[in-house]
Image: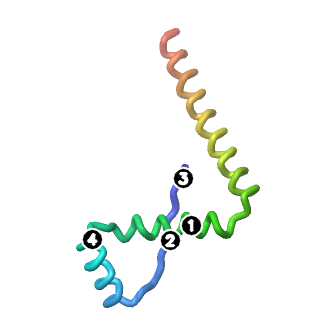
Amino acid sequence: MKQDSVTVSFDAERLKAVKLYMGKKKIVLETELANQLRRLYEKHVPVSVREYIEQAETMDLSQAQSGRESGAQEKKKV
């Protein structure tokens, strides 16, 4: 799955504090933000759209695997 980035502005002192206290609990800020974004996706994107996206990802993955397999078979023939 192709990844994209999100940029968010936040008060520098507050960011420093949250990183400090999360670090004491061995929690990674980026992981927590990704989890929250996933929850927002699940909350706001209709189920039918999520299913469509998942099917498209599955099809892309299977097509990529088929391409690799046929490429490997071509190399064996040579």
* First reached walking from the N terminus: tag 3 or tag 4: 3
Kindly check if marks 4 and 1 are in contact, taking CB atoms under 8 A apart as contact.
no
- Mark 3 crowdedness (10 Å alpha carbons): few <14, some 14-19, many ≥20: few
User: In the image, is 71 to the left or to the right of 15?
Assistant: right
Q: Quadrant of residue 21?
A: bottom left
Q: Which is more N-terminal, label 1 or label 3? A: 3
Q: Nearer the viewer, mark 3 or mark 1?
A: 1
Tell me the element at label 1. helix
Above or below 1: residue 20? below
At a point 45% along the width and 70% down the height, the residue shown is 33
Q: Amino acid at mark 2?
A: Val
Find the residue positioned furthest to the front: 25
Q: Earlier in the sequence, mark 1 or mark 2?
A: 2
> Which residue sits at x=65%, y=48%?
54
- Amino acid identity at mark 3: Lys
Q: Secondary structure at mark 2?
A: loop
Task: Judge from the rendering whether residue 24 lies leftward or rightward of residue 58; answer left or right.
Answer: left
Circle 1/circle 2 CB separation < 8 Å: no
Q: Which residue of the protein is positioned furthest toward the left in this rendering?
A: 24
As rendered, which of 61 and 49 lies closer to the eye? 49
Indicate whether 58 appears above or below 2: above
Q: Residue at x 31, y 90 (%)?
A: 13
Where is residue 53 shown, x and y percent of the image?
68, 52
Residue under pointer 4: 25
* Residue kind at label 1, given as amino acid type: Arg
The residue singled out by tag 3 in the image is 2
Residue at position x 66%, y 39% in the image: 59
In the depicted structure, whether residue 75 falls above or below residue 24: above
> Residue reaching furthest top?
77
Give the residue at the far right of this rendering. 48
